[in-house]
Image: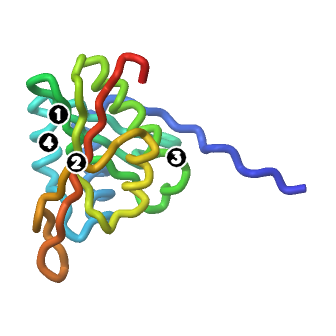
Amino acid sequence: MIMPTAEPPSNVRVMVHDDLKQISDIERRSYDFPWSHGVFRDCLLAGYHCIVIERADTVVGYAILSVAAGEAHILNLCVDSAHRHLRYGERLLDEILLRARGAEVNEIFLEVRPSNIAALALYKKKGFHEITQRPAYYQAKDGREDAAVLCKVLNKRD
């Protein structure tokens, strides 16, 4: 009898400057229009909640959260394509939600491409709901793509 493989061991921790090359590499492999190394560096310098998930001392994903005026915004959450479907994205999202609750925010927002079915499913599983769309928000190979704006109200019991 073949037993299902367990989730690979991983560690979530605060992002540091030395992670930026690995993060930028993952970003470039994941998106047609990636964030630059400088954008990630600026997020660190701005004091955003920046975290990574690593496996065997290799960064396999990251997330960035900004907090201001009683609300939070997930700016980026990505898992390297070679490590998807192993629940790393869910672990990153759970940690981001924990940090948002720790910052005592009431709501957390994000934008996501409607074509990103896997991300939409994860966010909906975690209690996010669509509140609006931003027309032509993302660059796309064939012009622009709308963004679905999602929100989750954070309760103390979450």
Mark 3 element type: loop
Q: Which residue is mark 2?
A: 131
Q: CA distance from mark 1 to mark 2?
A: 19 Å
Identify the mark nearer the N-term, 1 or 4: 4
Q: Residue furthest right?
A: 1
Check the image and tell me how it is coloured. rainbow
Which of 117/99 is in front? 117
Q: Are marks 3 and 1 in contact (CB under 8 Å)?
A: no
User: Which quarter of the rendering shows the C terminus?
Assistant: top left
| Mark before the other along the chain sequence, 3 or 2 | 3
- Identify the residue position indicated by label 1 in the image: 66
**Discs 4/3, front:** 3
Looking at the rendered structure, the kind of residue marked 2 is Ile
Q: Nearer the viewer, residue 153 or 27?
A: 153
Q: Say above or below: 33 vs 103.
A: below
Neighbourhood count class around disc 2 (C-alpha, 10 Å): few under 14, some 14–19, many 20 upward: few
Q: Which residue is mark 3?
A: 87
Q: Residues within 10 Å of mark 1 (few under 14, many from 20)?
A: some
Q: Say which residue appears at 49% left-offset and 55% top-offset.
A: 83
Q: Are marks 4 and 3 in contact (CB under 8 Å)?
A: no
Report helix, strand or loop for mark 1: strand
Amino acid type shown at disc 3: Arg
Sequence-earlier tag: 1 or 2: 1
The amino acid pointed to by label 4 is Arg
Image quarter (top left, top right, bottom left or bottom right) of the N terminus: bottom right
Q: CA distance from mark 3 to mark 2?
A: 26 Å
User: How far apart, in angstroms, are the residues tagged by discs 4 and 3?
Assistant: 26 Å
Residue 62, horizontal then vertical, whole percent: 33, 44
- For this orientation, the residue located farthest to the bottom is 142
Q: Amino acid at mark 1?
A: Ser
Q: CA distance from mark 3 to mark 1?
A: 23 Å
